[in-house]
Image (tube, rainbow, N blue to C red):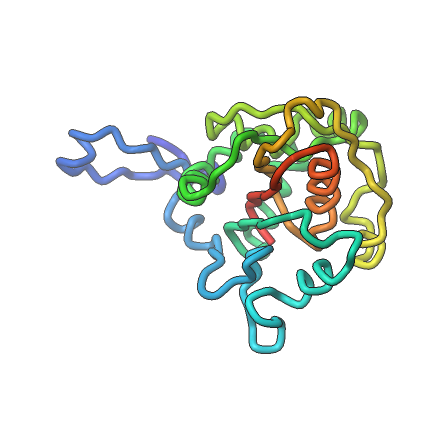
Amino acid sequence: MKRCLVCDEGMKEALTWRSLLVRAEAKVICEKCEGKLNRITGETCTICSRELGRNYSTGDICLDCSRWERNREWSGYLSKNISLFHYNEDLKDIIAKYKYRGDYALAEVFVPFLKDRLKDMEFDLVTAIPLSDERLRERGFNQGQALAVFLGLHTAEILTRIHTEKQSKKSRQERMSLPQVFQVIQTDLLEHKSILIIDDIYTTGTTLRHAAKALKTAGAREVSSITLAR
């Protein structure tokens, strides 16, 4: 019997004529665990995917993105971020097991959801937010890179990262005022290209905007991103 990658409970698969005749993509998460993933729906910010509330938007973008776009230093670099889920406690636990406790296989949980959103996105090159050498040794793998591998996407290593303190330890204001932490290493691949960045969590948008700014400054035409949560 197949077991859920999240809770390890056995999963019974109902046999139908369709399942016998068509080789459907095998599920790796049980219905109970999938039900705890809170999908982002409804009207969302056209830049970052945040659900828009009455007191948290200006037009079709959220107040956070409005502040980014009014800042000349950051305006126009990140075209769009698509996030799949709200970062609730259940998803936080899954991502902690995946990202910090090295459960590489959990990347597979998100593949069907990512594929569903990626089919409507256009891009020339895919890259993952890089980790510093120190952070990579700590975790054993790059979480964005692992998602790309499970999706069957080839990624281009076009950015390097300077080692900094963990973002999770910084306040919102500290994150937003960080100096540039990325360097482009293959500028020849970028000219007039649309780049898709894969990452796990959109928090303030600082990391993705730093990466987008580095890429666009080096010649990329457009930079968008897809993340599991925000």
Residue at 69% x, 33% y is 219
Horizontal side, residue 110 vs residue 133: left or right: left
Q: Please report the residue visible at 36 percent of the width from the left and 32 percent of the height from the top.
A: 2
Residue for point 71% across, 29% down: 139
Tell how many labels. Answer: 0
Measured as percent of width and height from the top left, residue 180 is found at: 83, 41
- In the image, is residue 123 above or below residue 204? above
Q: Residue furthest left?
A: 17
Question: Toward the viewer: 101 or 145?
Answer: 145
Q: Is residue 120 above or below residue 157?
A: below
Q: Quadrant of the C terminus?
A: bottom right
**Residue 131 image position (x, y, % from top left):** 73, 31
Residue 127: percent from the left, percent from the top? 61, 31
Question: In the figure, residue 112 lies in which quadrant?
Answer: top left
Direction from residue 124 to residue 21 in the image, left or right:
left
* Residue nearer the viewer, 147 or 37: 147
Q: Is residue 195 above or below residue 44?
A: above
Residue closer to the observer: 58 or 167: 58
Q: Quadrant of the N terminus?
A: top left
**164 lies left or right of 151:** right
Q: Is residue 170 left or right of residue 139?
A: right
User: Most extreme residue toward the front, as rendered?
Assistant: 192
Res 184 quadrant in image:
top right
Q: Residue 180, relative to residue 87: is it above or below?
A: above
Q: Position of residue 199 (x, y in %)?
A: 62, 40
